[in-house]
């Protein structure tokens, strides 16, 4: 039986939740499920924005049929060819053989790659800035390469100010009946999964996300319809501000994330002692055992925290397996702008510190602290001072980093969304490009 919700009077959500999937893309656990969003516009012409994963095909086809109410499907806009949004495209083509597929050239090629070169398609090929008028609505197509695949594009409906944003602004987690972010306490209950989604899915492509955000702030947006997670119609600026921060690789939390790999508990013990000393100094800490917590969780935390400590035993003359995987994962997600320190352990030839430094030190704008702790099997009593010095070095780096930044920055911050206007004076008629509030909602930095 169909299960749909209206987004606006002529736009219908025809997607579905999947709560049975264990690993999204085969690698990211989704304990709270995931939604595959698809939207049907009922204008003079009917337009379907993307399809869904094969796992929810039955209800999706029923949703589309119900929402069409006996009308023909005129267009299907394919914004992203990853199969979680396109696996059921072939089913749509079978059911609505006269439908026109609206996509760019790269997408068209991928359609044939996925479904075979013999597929019969009516294609309306679009490029940056092309417009499709469907009656009352006017759809403008904007390319968003590498957010998250090279063929990705987004669509802006100027009639209602809706941005169909493909994977951007999505989150892990099923919708559970709620369609709009303002129907839940998003920032309390969903931000963590939104961050994990962002960092792991598009975290590598900060520059490309920034390019998309520039296009987004140039148009008036009243609603964002992503392909996963909630539709945004309120407090859009707050969420866009998060995307600004994440895509600039700016930490959200001043504090220390400590990730450790410990076979017999001795490396873990030093990590705990360090965390206690940092807490004594009033520093916020977060700890992970990399053999227990999935990498996607730690990658997200590394994007959140300002300072990172990696502690690993030496294993087969290298870094312990799970720590090695984590560090390479962080490198492949392009993590940057962090201050890091290392703790190594080795009963006869400790090499993990040097090797961890090589991986993380090669990333952009990383400050590697000279202070470190090197154990031989376990922490000797006389090494407690080394841990103390490491804690002090981290706090000293924290104060040094925050002080000049505050002195240097001159400008005004939007109290609504966090947008920063740089300059000595804020023009009286200034309008925030993110949340559209006026100069009265800004305050000096
Ligand atoms: Fe949700 Fe890149 O697919």
Image (tube, rainbow, N blue to C red):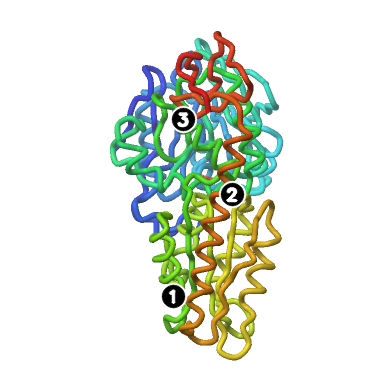
Q: Is residue 293 visible?
A: yes
Residue toward you, 299 or 42: 299
Q: CA distance from mark 3 to mark 1?
A: 44 Å
Residue 24 sits above or below residue 380 on the image: above
Q: Which tag is nearer the camera, tag 1 or tag 2?
A: 2
Instruction: Please tell me how crowded label 3 is: few (under 14), some (14-19), or many (20+) other residues with Cα within 10 Å.
Output: many
Q: Is residue 111 visible?
A: no
Q: Is mark 1 within 8 Å of ligand 1?
A: no
State the image coordinates of residue 3 (x, y, percent, origin top left).
30, 35
Asked if disc 3 and disc 2 are in contact, CB closer than 8 Å, the reply is no
Name the image quarter holding residue 65.
top left
Q: Which residue is mark 3?
A: 225
- At a point 63% along the width and 59% down the height, the residue shown is 331
Name the image quarter holding residue 120.
top right
Q: Which residue is mark 1?
A: 268
Q: Is residue 19 left or right of residue 166?
A: left
The mark nearer the N terminus, 1 or 2, is: 1
Q: Which tag is nearer the camera, tag 3 or tag 1?
A: 1
State the image coordinates of residue 443 (x, y, percent, origin top left).
48, 22
Residue toward you, 368 or 356: 368
Residue toward you, 98 or 35: 35
State the image coordinates of residue 87 (x, y, percent, origin top left).
52, 46
Q: Is mark 3 within 8 Å of ligand 1?
A: no
Q: CA distance from mark 3 to mark 2?
A: 41 Å
Q: Secondary structure at mark 2?
A: helix
Q: Which residue is mark 2?
A: 400
- At a point 42% along the width and 58% down the height, the residue shown is 281
């Amino acid at each position: 039986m169909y299960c749909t919700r209206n987004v606006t009077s002529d736009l219908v959500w025809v997607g579905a939740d999947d709560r049975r999937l264990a690993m999204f893309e085969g690698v990211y656990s989704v304990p709270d499920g995931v939604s595959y969003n698809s939207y049907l516009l009922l204008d003079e012409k009917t337009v379907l924005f993307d399809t869904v994963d094969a796992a929810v095909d039955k209800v999706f086809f029923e949703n589309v049929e119900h929402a069409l109410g006996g009308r023909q499907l005129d267009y299907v806009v394919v914004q992203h060819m990853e199969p979680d949004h396109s696996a059921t495209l072939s089913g749509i083509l079978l059911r609505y053989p006269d439908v026109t597929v609206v996509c760019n050239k790269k997408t068209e090629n991928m359609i044939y790659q996925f479904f075979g070169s013999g597929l019969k398609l009516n294609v309306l090929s679009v490029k940056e800035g092309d417009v499709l008028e469907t009656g009352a609505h006017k759809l403008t197509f904007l390319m968003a390469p590498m957010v998250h695949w090279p063929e990705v594009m987004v669509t802006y409906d100027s009639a209602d100010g809706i941005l169909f944003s493909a994977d951007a602004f999505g989150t892990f987690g099923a919708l559970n009946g709620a369609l709009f972010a303002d129907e839940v306490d998003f920032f309390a209950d969903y931000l963590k999964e939104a961050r994990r989604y962002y960092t792991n899915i598009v975290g590598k492509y900060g520059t490309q996300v920034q390019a998309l955000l520039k296009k987004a702030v140039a148009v008036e947006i009243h609603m964002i319809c992503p392909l996963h997670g909630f539709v945004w119609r309120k407090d859009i600026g707050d969420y866009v501000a998060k995307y600004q921060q994440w895509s600039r690789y700016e930490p959200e939390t001043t504090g220390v994330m400590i990730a450790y790999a410990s076979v017999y508990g001795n490396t873990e013990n030093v990590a705990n002692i360090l965390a206690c000393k940092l807490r004594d100094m009033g520093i916020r800490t977060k700890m992970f055992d990399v053999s227990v917590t999935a990498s996607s969780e730690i990658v997200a935390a590394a994007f959140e925290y300002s300072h990172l400590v990696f502690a690993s035993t030496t294993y087969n003359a290298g870094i312990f397996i799970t720590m090695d995987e984590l560090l390479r994962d962080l490198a492949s997600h392009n993590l940057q702008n962090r201050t890091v320190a290392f703790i190594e352990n080795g009963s006869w030839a400790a090499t993990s510190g040097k090797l961890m430094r090589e991986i993380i030190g090669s990333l952009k704008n990383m400050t590697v602290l000279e202070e470190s702790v090197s154990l031989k099997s376990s922490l000797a009593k006389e090494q407690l001072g080394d841990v103390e010095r490491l804690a002090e070095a981290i706090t000293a780096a924290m104060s040094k980093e925050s002080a000049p930044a505050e002195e240097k920055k001159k400008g005004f911050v939007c109290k609504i969304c966090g947008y920063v206007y740089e300059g000595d004076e804020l023009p009286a008629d200034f309008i925030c490009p993110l949340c559209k509030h006026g100069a009265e909602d800004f305050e000096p930095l």
